[in-house]
Amino acid sequence: MIVPMKHLTLLCTADSTERTLESLRNLKCAHLDVGAAPSAETAEAKEVLSRAETAIRILAKAAEDSKVSNGLNGSNGLKAFNGLRGEALVDAVLAADAKRRELEDVADKLRHTITRYEPYGDFDPALARELLDLGIDLASVAELPDPLPCERLSETRRKLAAAETEIAGITASLAAADAEARRITAEIPAFKDRIAFAAARDEMEREGEVAWICGWIPQDAVPAVRASAAREGWGLLVRDPEPGETPPTYIRPPKLFRPVTALFEGLGIAPAYEESDVSVPFFCYFTLFFAMLVGDGGYGLILLFMTLWGWRRTKPREGTGHRPRAVRSWLTLMTVFSAGTVMWGILSNTWFGASIPAIDVTHFQSAAMQNVCLALNSVFNGASVKWLADPSYNNMMFLCFTIGVSHLMLARIWNAVCMINSLACIAELGWAGILLFMYFVVNAIIGIFPSVPAWSFWLFGVSVVLVVSRTRGSALGMLPLNIMGAMGDIISYVRLFAVGYASLQVAQNFNRMAIELELPVWAKIVPMVLILLVGHVMNFMLAGLAVLVHAVRLNTLEFSNHKGITWSGQAFCPFRKN
């Protein structure tokens, strides 16, 4: 559900703004209307965060460069930042990097000088200059450059060696600062809290001895805010949203489907406040789309093992026994998505682009081995659906069109239920009928159905009448195009088959390339492994890209257009500590 919001105006005395904001932040339920014009203090806080993020990148790059260049690890470097914390640590890292860049510029100039004067040897330019001033012609004795260098070549080389030694020392100290990098990373949330607090203080308006701030709170948080107001001595004005106001969207799905909010946050989308919460169908259909687009049980197993490793590696917060909500939500999502992909691999018997054949149990004398083989056959072959392996691919396309019409009709029927007390309900039912008719048309065009059922034409006629009865103005002129668009929306779900099939073909081709190498067995192993590794890693990454493009599109475009979701909302972001 989308939680109903209340507009909040909070008043306090001007000299208690800091304490008021601290108390409001501890409530963790107020979405503040923060303006876009920060004060100098807010800008300073943002600058601190930017510098901290730059310092983290510097330390990470130094560690990587050091490993690549000479295998230096953290224990070999100079611990130059011990005892520093917070902004002092960030300043020290940035100062060290600035010094290193300055030395690198000096070293580059010295190298250029050495390259220029090296052909003339290590002569003394001061002595040469004195002889020239005395009128002695040195051209007959030695070739001299024009102009003369400032110092001997050996002195330039000594300075270059000193600069390179100092650069190496700074790089070593930066590369060795693993613990310091972790400390800066751990303080990033505090820096963000400082920005949010400064922005909230900027937003507080003042008039004489009174200060106030506006925002939004969930309806069920009103009692807690009133209790805090009574305790702190605040003045409150809590009211319903007025026409023209745009409250933030606070989605609170059923607990089983709550992790999908992390996906919304990752995609940066939120329905408008007046729209519906589609998190439950979004989660269910996205899982199905994920499994079909990846389409390989082997890739699903890799994802599942990586997710289980993530569960093991992430630790609960001290004192709470729980992982951070965002981490827990993403791990739950990936567990569901990867398990769904493994299930699809079992149903289609697809494992790294290959099918696992049934094991002939008669080859084994041991009853235990025969039982093991029977169990494997039941998992990898008995559970597979031969219907999905139809060589004409009609069955897969039929499945995609069926998924599509169910998805889109769900949107229209849902709208009709929400409008049950309005005549607009009949138009939504009409669109559901049009979608069903177009489903038969699409299957007949492809050749899956021999023809369009006769009764569906009556359904189409009645549905069009229902839609026309509630359509006015320019929308009536666009109606024929919208009806054809409904057919296009159903056809677009064939991408689930097309992309999954393309991924399967890529995997099979790499398998074939590896197996058919015309080399002796002893020389074939290494290139075969490399081909399989590179091919499947690339295919795995392309499958992830397909999920981001197609699974998201089918939910946020095709389904959302029929449901009336514009994704134009502002996500609820309460004022609280990170």
Image (spheres, rainbow, N blue to C red):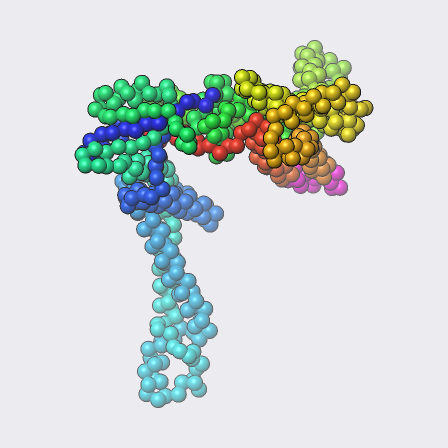
Q: The C terminus is located in which quarter?
A: top left
Dominant SS in magenta:
helix
Residue range corresponding to the magenta coloring: 516-533
Decide whether residue 521 is among the magenta residues. yes
Judged left or right of residue 273, residue 421 is right
Q: Is residue 47 visible?
A: yes
Residue 522 at x, y percent in the picture: 70, 38
Q: Nearer the viewer, residue 107 or 234?
A: 234
Report the residue at 79% width, 27% height from top: 447
Report the residue at 60% width, 30% height from top: 472
Residue 575 at x, y percent in the picture: 34, 30
Residue 418 at x, y percent in the picture: 54, 19
Quarter of the figure with residue 361: top right
* Residue at the far top in the pictured view: 367
Q: Is residue 194 visible?
A: no
Judged left or right of residue 414, residue 382 is right
Report the residue at 22% width, 29% height from top: 12
Q: Nearer the viewer, residue 291 or 64?
A: 291
Q: Nearer the viewer, residue 117 or 206?
A: 206
State whether residue 504 is above or below residue 177: above
Judged left or right of residue 345, residue 29 is left
Report the residue at 35% width, 34% height from top: 33
Quarter of the figure with residue 326: top left
* Residue at the far right in the pictured view: 450
State whether residue 525 is above or below residue 156: above
Judged left or right of residue 191, residue 65 is right
Q: Nearer the viewer, residue 299 or 229?
A: 229
Residue 97 at x, y percent in the picture: 36, 51
